[in-house]
Amino acid sequence: DKHVISYATDLHKAIIIVVNKWDAVDKSTNTMAEFTKNIRNQYKFLDYAPVCYVSALKRTRINTIFETLEMVHAAYYTRIKTSVLNDVLQDAQVMNIAPDFNGGRVKIYYASQVDVAPPNIALFVNEPEWMHFSYQRYIENRLRESFNFEGTPIKISLRRRTKSGENNKKV
């Protein structure tokens, strides 16, 4: 399973985790929550992927797959207004200041969504090398919370803010 999933993640595809044969599981009050917790522990890199529980044999909960597909498809093709995106990022920076890393502290001046399928956000910063991976992950999580990017990866590209007319360095 992890090998197949790695193909999808490498290609930045939207992902839904479907647990089949749910009818064969002895259930108690917290069974679904326990299964989900176990899946999240095994697939930590897919914390954004929704989990659906179905039984193909008994045709139960099949509709949850299609409902989830519609939600994830919408997230995959979501386009965010630049002003709204920048408001969220400014709030994120105020709530949690970037750490010093590689000799400096990254400052996000502004952002723009440059593509969809999956959403690709360009962050224009003072120095791309100063972005610590944990802070970039924090920014990604804030974007997920604000714009419901469930099931879809988010690509974040860092670009050095330059004076107009100069090329932006992509990292």
Image (cartoon, rainbow, N blue to C red):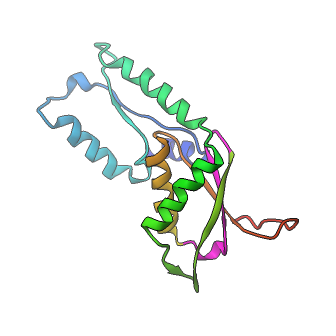
Which quadrant is the N terminus positioned in?
A: top left
Q: Residue furthest right?
A: 165
Q: Residue furthest top?
A: 58
* Residue at 49% across, 38% down: 15
Q: Is residue 137 above or below residue 114?
A: below
Membership of 124 in magenta stretch? yes
Residue 88, horizontal then vertical, whole percent: 52, 54
* Residue at 50% across, 25% down: 70
Q: Which residues, given as a range, are shown in magenta?
A: 115-131
Q: Quadrant of residue 131?
A: bottom right
Q: Is residue 4 above or below residue 93?
A: above
Q: Residue furthest bottom?
A: 103
Q: Is residue 38 above or below residue 157?
A: above
Q: Quadrant of residue 128?
A: bottom right
Left or right: 21, with 149 as reference point:
left
Membership of 114 in magenta stretch? no
- For the image, the number of numbered tags is 0
